[in-house]
Each structure stands twice: as C-alpha cells, then as structure tokens.
Amino acid sequence: MRGEGGELVHLLTRDVGEVLARLGDREVRHVLVEGGPSLATAFLAAGAVDELHAYVAPVLLGSGRRAVDGLGVATIADAHRFRTVEVRRVGDDALVVSRKSTEGRDG
C-alpha cells in the first residue's frame, strides 16, 4: 500500500485487523479499498467498512462474478446495513454512495 508521497508498505498478511493496526501505527486514518470479491468480503466481514461506493450500469451480462462473496448472513435481520447518502449520475451509469447504518448487524 502506498499513500500519496508516502513509502510503500508491504504486509505479508491476510488479516484485516493486522493491516489496519499497522496503518494506524503510521497515523493512516482513511483507506480506499479496491479489489475483487475476496478483498471486499474480508473487509466487510471484519466490520471495517464504513462507506460503500457502488457503480450501477444499465448493462445486462447475465450470470457473472459477484461483487462480494458469502458473508455468512442467514437472515435479513443479520444483514450488513448501509444507508444511501448520495446518488450521482456518471454518464449512463449511477454512483451510489452508502454509509454504515446504526441498525442491524453493524449497529
């Protein structure tokens, strides 16, 4: 990981808590996580996500890869909840910004 103008931080772990602790030691307070379903799931499962940015495009592909892998949620009551705070048109697409809700599992 590298911040603007900062040194490269290479951590040999898959433990989200350890990554965030090491970044916290360096006084990093905000992290943008971009990646595939495994990385997104790891941060969501660790309760380390407070804001989501999701792009929705009017394009139908049929079946395909998921944005998030299984989170072990068996009921709607256990769902990770976010509240939509912004919807912005980006060309033909839409950006939906949501923040962690105080209701449900993450509250």
Image (spheres, rainbow, N blue to C red):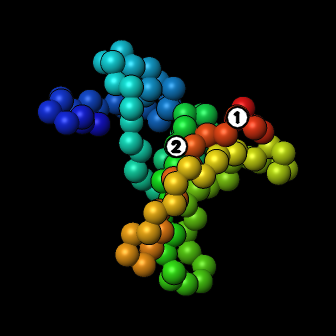
- Picture quarter containing residue 29? top left
Which sits earlier in the primary sequence, circle 1 or circle 2?
2
Q: Amino acid at mark 2?
A: Glu
Q: Secondary structure at mark 1?
A: loop
Residue furthest toward the left? 5
Above or below residue 89? Residue 21 is above
Residue at horizontal 49 percent and vertical 75 percent from the top: 57
Q: Is residue 107 left or right of residue 43?
A: right
Q: Position of residue 71 (x, y in %)?
A: 68, 48
Residue at horizontal 54 percent and vertical 38 percent from the top: 50
Residue at horizontal 41 percent and vertical 44 percent from the top: 33
Q: What residue does disc 2 label?
A: 51
* Whether residue 42 can be seen here: no
Q: Position of residue 95 (x, y in %)?
A: 47, 62
Q: Is residue 54 left or right of residue 90?
A: right
Residue at horizontal 58 percent and vertical 64 percent from the top: 66
Q: Position of residue 19 (x, y in %)?
A: 42, 28
Q: Is residue 31 left or right of residue 2?
A: right
Q: Which mark is residue 102?
A: 1
